Amino acid sequence: MIYEKVKILTLGRQICGHWNGAAGYEWLVTNGLGGYACGTVALANTRRYHGFLMASLKPPVQRTLLVAKIDLSVEYLGQVTALSANEFVDGTISPQGFIHLESFTVLDGIPTWRFCVADALLQQQIFMAPGANTSYLRLAVLRSSAPLRVTLKPFVTYRDYHSLGIGPRPFQLEPGADRCLIQAFDGARPYRLLVSHGAFTPTPEWYWHFWHREEALRGLDAAEDLFFPGTFGADLTPEVALCFIATAETSAPAAGDEVLKGVEAKAKALSASLPSTAPGWIRSLASASDQFIVRRDAPAGATSIIAGYPWFADWGRDTMIALPGLATALRRYDIAAGIFRTYASFVDRGMLPNRFPDGGEAPEYNTADATLWMFHALDDYFQATHDATLLSDLFPVLTTIIRAHAEGTRYGIHVDPRDGLLCAGEPGTQLTWMDAKHGDEVFTPRTGKAVEINALWLNALRVMVGFAEHMGSQGDQRFCAQLLDRATSNFGRFWNAERSCLYDVIDVDGGSARDDRVRPNQILAISLPHCVLSAAQMRAVVIRCGQELLTSFGLRSLSPSAPGYIGQYAGNPRRRDAAYHMGTAWGWLLGPYARAHFQVYGDARTAQSLLESMATHVHGACIGTIGEIFDGDAPHTARGCFAQAWSVAEILRSWIYLERRISKAQGSID
C-alpha cells in the first residue's frame, strides 16, 4: 500500500494480483438519484448488489439492476489477455484478469484500474453521469508500442436489487452498428448499450450460475444467471480513448470525457471546502459525502440523503444525523436547506418519517428520534448561516412538533407529566436507532424513557427557546422554557451512581425498572451541545464508554461484560438482526465519542486522534468511504453496508470541528 498526503491509497500488485485480495476490496460511484455502480477491485461481482448500472427508476427508490458487469479483454501484439474475473457456483474463477492489475486507486472519486499487458499500460475508469441513470467505462492507453484491440462483453439483466435473476427470460434485442437496445419484457424500461467508437456484434446467449459469495455468507441465495447480448470491439491508441456507456435515459448521453471532468471538478471543490491541513483520508470522505445526497421525485425538486449503499434508501433518522457532516460542515448550505424543506413537508402528527419504502409507498413514521435530530441539525445550520428566511418558514412546523410531543402522538410518544421526560414505545415497536426487528421479534425495544431520546428532547427544547426568541414568539418561548426546566430538573434520574454512568432506559415498559446495561446511547448526552450533567458525571460517562465500548472503528452497542453480548455480526438474517445492537460496533458513534472527549478534557488534538484509526478503514474496505458496522470482537471486521451516510458524516464533521478548535487555539484561522 502506498499512502500519499492528499490522494487516497493505491493498491498494488501485492493485493490486486491475488483473488482474495482483489475480491476483498470494493468501490462505489453514484448518480445523485439513488442509482449507483459498484463492485470489487477484481471486477467480479461478489454481492447481488454489485453492478455496472443499478438504475433508480423512481428516484431515489425502485433500484433495478440493468447491467451487471462488463468483461474486458485486449488483443496486443498478437496475444489475447482477459482482464476481468467471475466466480461460478462450482468454485471456478474465470477469467483471472486481476493478475494483470498493476494498481487500483480512487482519484477524485473515480475508481481507476491500471492493467499491464506486456509493455502496454491500460487505464480503466468507471463513473456515472450526475442526475442520470447512465454509467460509463472509459479505457485509455497510457503506454504501448502498438495499437490495442479491446473487446467488451456486457452481462445484463432486469431485476429488483434485492432479488436474483434465475433462468432464461425473453429479452428483446435491437442491435445497431455501435450500439444495442435491450428490453427485458413488455412494459420494462428499455436501456441502451453503446460505445464512443467501435462496433457491436450481436451474439445473444445466456451465461449460467454466477456466484455471489458475500450473499452466501449472509445466509441468502447466491447464484444468478445473466444475459449476454453480444460484444463491443474497438481499436485503442494513446491518442484515442474509448467510452462504453450504459443508459436507461431516453435522451442522448453526454460525452464521457465531459462527464468525467465534471465529476472530478466536484470532488476537488468538496476537498477545497476543508481546512488546508486535512489529510488524504479526510479529503476522500469529503468526496464521498456527495454520494449520499439525492434527488426525490416527490415532491418535485426535493432533496434527501441515502442512508447507505448498497441497500438502504433515505431514512429520516439517518438523514438528520448525517446532514450536518454531509452538507453544513462542507458549507453546502443550499443542499442543507433543501433537505430541511423536504422533510418538513412530510411532518405528520409532529413526526418526521422514519423510512420511505423502496416501492414508493407512503412513508413510515415509526421513530422517536428522527424528529428530534432535526432540531440539532437545524441549530447547527443556523449557527453557521443565520438563515432567518428558512427559520421563519419552518418555525410553524417546529412549534407543531413540540406541542405534539408534549401532548402525545404515535407509538406512545409523550411527555410524562410527573417528571417532564419523554416516553416512547409500544409492544412490538422499535422507535430508537437501535431498531433491529426480525418478523415480529423486536430485539431491542427500549420502551420507556431512553437516555438519548431525552438528551435530544432537552436539546430540542433549548434550541426552540432560542428560535422562539429570534422569531419574537414569547408564548412559544415560555412554553418551551417550562418544558425544558421540568425535564432538566429530572434528567438526573438517568444517573447510575453504582456504575458511574447513565442508565440506558428508565421506567422500562411504563414501570419503575431501569436498564443498567452499558450502551453507547449515553455518550450523546455529552456530545450534544446542551448537557445538564455535572462535569464529574460527564467525565465518568466518557471513561465508562472508553473502557467498555470503544474500538478502533466505533463504539460497541453493548458492553462485552453484559449478558447477551454478541461479538460477531454474521450468519443468516435472524442471527445478524439479533447481533445488530447487542455488541456490534457502529462507526458513526466514533464522532460523538470524540466530541464528548473534547467536551470533557478540552484537548482537541487528543480527541481528534481518536478518529485517525478510521483512516485504515477508509483505505481498506470500500475504498474512499466508511461502512456501517464492525464486529464488536477484534479484529473488528467491517460488516453491513459498505458505505454509510452517518458514518462518513460524523467522522468528517467531528474531524473538521476539532481541527477548527486546534486552529483557534493556535491563533490561526482556516
Image (cartoon, rainbow, N blue to C red):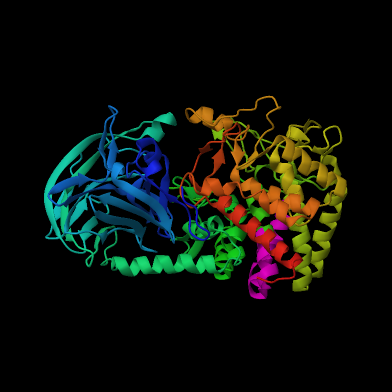
Residue at (60%, 59%) from the top-left corner?
325
Q: Nearer the viewer, residue 243 or 566?
A: 243
**Residue 418 seen in render:** no
Query: Where does the image place residue 37, in percent across and percent down from the top left?
Result: 37, 52
Count of marks placed on residues? 0
Res 16 → quadrant = top left
Residue drawn at (58%, 47%) of the image: 614
Report x, y in % for residue 469. 79, 70
Q: Is residue 169 left or right of residue 572?
A: left
Query: Residue at the spot x=68%, y=53% of the render?
Result: 608
The overriding secondary structure of the stretch rendered in magenta is helix
Residue 458: give x, y in percent of width and height.
Answer: 78, 53
Q: Is 563 contained in the magenta span?
A: no
Q: Is residue 594 visible?
A: yes
Query: Residue 6, how many percent across, how many down?
Result: 51, 61
Q: Quadrant of residue 566?
A: top right
Residue 628's place in the image compared with 382, above or below, is above
127 left or right of 545 in image: left
Question: Toward the viewer: 390 or 120?
Answer: 120
In the image, the segment drawn in magenta is 377-405
**In the image shown, does 67 or 547 lie closer to the viewer?**
547
- Image: 52 above or below 501: below
Quadrant of image for the C terminus: bottom right
